[in-house]
Image (spheres, helix red, strand yellow):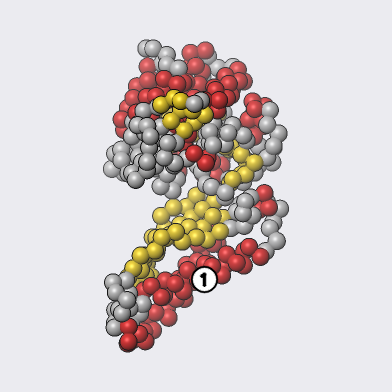
Amino acid sequence: MQVLTSRQILDRLVMFPTVSRDSNLGLIDWLEGYLSGHGVRCFRHWNEDRRKAALIAHAGPWKAGALVLSGHSDVVPVDGQSWTTDPWTVSERDGRLYGRGTCDMKGFVALAVRALVEAQRRGVSRPLQLALSYDEEVGCTGAPPMIRTMQEVVPKGSAAIIGEPSRMGLITGHKGGTGYHVHVKGHEVHSSLLPYGVSAIMEGARLIDWLNDVNAELQARTPTPLAAAFHPPFTTLHVGMIRGGTAHNITAADCHFSVEMRVVPGESIPDWEARFEARVREIEAAMRKVRPEAAIHLDRFFGVPGLQPERNGEAEALVRRLTGDNATGVVSYGTEAGQFQQAGYSAVICGPGDIAQAHQPDEYLEISQFEAGQQFMERLLEALA
């Protein structure tokens, strides 16, 4: 089978429109066939309806202690965005590679796939693994079951590099996150009879106002040493969309909005969830004193652990040797790195591209960043050999 370059692999990966709402099996089928054709052992973890799969691959000796290269197969939609090129074809111009996912994060995946083939071809003393998830873009929900399957089908790795775009800089920590879809169920009456109904919008506003008060409280605190490295250096609570009501003179029967929390390392996501849910139940109890059928329904739609900076972490030490980067970096967005760390892997983030390009129309990866990623993988292969 022909050995493809990293760029040729990237061209193939971008051709598959693996938007999170759709299947990723075309990409997984091709990638599994390509890796298997070069002697790399591959395994799948299927989602419940078998429309999507994660791909787990192992190159090199069949023993524990592998280095894991972690990426996700899914991308965000292009609907409603103004693209000047075909988003599903890599277009090169002005030193950039344009296409959906080139930056986030098929560029890194292409580099990782080539590295696995080369590890198998050249022979390495330490194994190299690929962990390619699904549904990262909808709350990092695909990685935990994939990681559990990894423990069953391949020897346990010891360190993981999550290749989210960091301009090939070393990221050792990120915030965790959790989120709820909130449905406030009220009771309609004419607005002139306001005390006898329950306005779902106005009761939802009580909860949103509580979020504002908590944000102000958090912002006024002196940040902990661990939180001080982040921008902003505190946990944040946010509502981005809201809808409800039918007319200006009817108390709203329904109000829908979503709440997300970005939690700094050192604080407990379950504690924040408990605090939020306690406030919800207080408001709900007051609503039910007016109308017993009133309610607030919560649907927790994501939960991502933070990445804690490690003392003497194996992954950090390795990436420092390969990049020469002695700086410490943290980010406020979430990744699958915290999930690998929670499962017992030493974990860091390091990948080509700039996070500012992720999800944008005319998303691009600078060719210089792609080349820097190739050089990183070459040094990695030398280290594994």
Locate residue 97 relative to residue 176 in the image: left or right. Answer: left
Residue type for callout 1: Trp
Q: In what quadrant of the picture does the C terminus appear?
A: top right
Residue nearer the viewer, 296 or 313: 296
Residue 258, placed above or below residue 137: below
Residue nearer the viewer, 153 or 224: 224
Locate residue 194 relative to residue 270 in the image: left or right. Answer: left
Residue that appears at 59% across and 31% down = 168
Q: Where's residue 334, x and y in %?
A: 52, 47
Residue at numbered disc 1: 210
Q: Is any atom of residue 64 visible in this view?
A: no
Query: Dividing the picture into quarters, in which one does residue 140 lie?
Result: top left
Residue 352, placed above or below residue 285: above
Query: Dividing the picture into quarters, in which one does residue 143 lie?
Result: top left
Residue that appears at 53% across and 47% down = 333
Pointer 1 local density, CA inside 10 Å: few below 14, some 14–19, many at least 20: some
